[in-house]
Image (tube, helix red, strand yellow):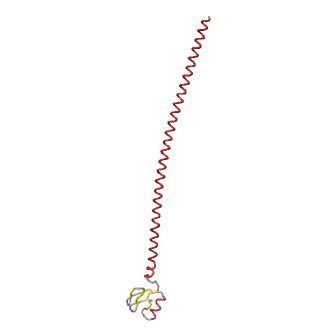
Amino acid sequence: MAKKKENKQAKQNEAKKVQDETAQDEQAELAQAEIEQAKAEAEKAKEEADKAKDEIEQAKAEAEKAKEEADKAKAEIEQAKAEAEKAKKEADQAKPKADKTKVPTGKKYQCQWQVNHNGKKYQAGETISLDDKTANDLLANGAIKELK
């Protein structure tokens, strides 16, 4: 009977040992599955990080391009300002010349003989426009007569 008991105990021990090994194998398999899942998640995270890095690089490139375009536009604005300033100076210089050659817009008179006015010669019979002050002297000496 002792031998039966020993065999039974040995079988129970063997069964427990197999059960323990099976549990250990299952735990090892579970741990291995968790490792594989962690690796997959890490790979996915790496891919997402790489994608984010690429997006950042693209955004940097776009920002640099926008900065270059803004700098170019700024330079064009500065050039336009300089050209406008130059044109204004030229216009300011031309204005006194234009004022000297401007034809008076006063009353109309007919020249009775040749009249020199503001650097222009008017022949007898020509029409000339004069302001009252300028016309008074010429009317007084008979060089012009007022047109009605």
Q: Looking at this rendering, what residue extends furthest in the top direction?
A: 1
> What x and y, as percent, mark residue 50?
48, 41
Q: Nearer the viewer, residue 109 or 96?
A: 96
The outermost residue toward the left is: 123
Q: Nearer the viewer, residue 115 or 62?
A: 62
Relative to 12, residue 65 above or below: below
Give the residue at x 48% y 50%.
60
Image location (x, y in percent) of residue 47: 49, 39
Choose between 142 and 100: the one closer to the eye.
Answer: 100
Answer with the quarter of the image where residue 17 lies: top right
Q: Nearer the viewer, residue 75 or 141?
A: 75
Measuring 62% from the left and 6% from the top, which residue is drawn there? Answer: 2
Q: Residue at x 50, y 38 (%)?
A: 46
Tally the marks: 0
In which quadrant of the rendered image does the C terminus lie?
A: bottom left
Q: Is residue 121 above or below residue 41?
A: below
Q: How far across and down, in percent of the image, does residue 29 sit?
A: 53, 25
**Residue 44 coordinates in the image, percent (x, y):** 50, 37
Outermost residue toward the bottom? 141
